[in-house]
Amino acid sequence: MSKHHTEPPEPGTLLVDANGKLGVFMGKGGPRYMLRPVRGGCEWEAEPDAVREPTPAERETAERQRAGRTAVSP
């Protein structure tokens, strides 16, 4: 996200951390963002200045994960 962006995203917003890991924004834990895997699981922390919005391809991957699929259907 932009360094000029002062407000955290809405809960449920899809983000990508500095390691390229897709996660759903859950809220803030102190100064850091709390992200959770798209299909659920343990949250992890990410620096707000080190996350970004997903690309269209990453968004598609997340939608497949949410639907319980891992491969693109023909």
Image (spheres, helix red, strand yellow):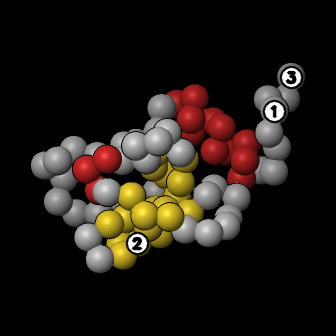
Helix or strand or loop: what does disc 2 sit on? Answer: strand
When the figure is inspected, residue 22 is found, relative to residue 8, above or below; the finding is above
Total labels drawn? 3
Query: How far across and how far down the image is residue 52, in percent?
Result: 36, 43
The amino acid pointed to by label 3 is Pro
How far apart are the alpha carbons under marks 3 and 2?
Answer: 36 Å
Q: Which residue is mark 2?
A: 27
Q: Are marks 2 and 1 in contact (CB under 8 Å)?
A: no
Q: Which mark is residue 71?
A: 1
Taking the image as shown, residue 41 lies to the left or right of residue 58, namely right
Q: Are marks 3 and 2 in contact (CB under 8 Å)?
A: no
**Whether residue 24 can be seen here:** yes
Q: Which mark is residue 74?
A: 3
How far apart are the alpha carbons under marks 3 and 1?
Answer: 9 Å
Taking the image as shown, residue 43 lies to the left or right of residue 3, namely right
Query: How far across and how far down the image is residue 24, in percent?
Result: 52, 58
Query: How far across and how far down the image is residue 30, in percent?
Result: 29, 77
When the figure is inspected, residue 16 is found, relative to residue 26, above or below; the finding is above
The amino acid pointed to by label 2 is Gly
When the figure is inspected, residue 30 is found, relative to residue 11, above or below; the finding is below
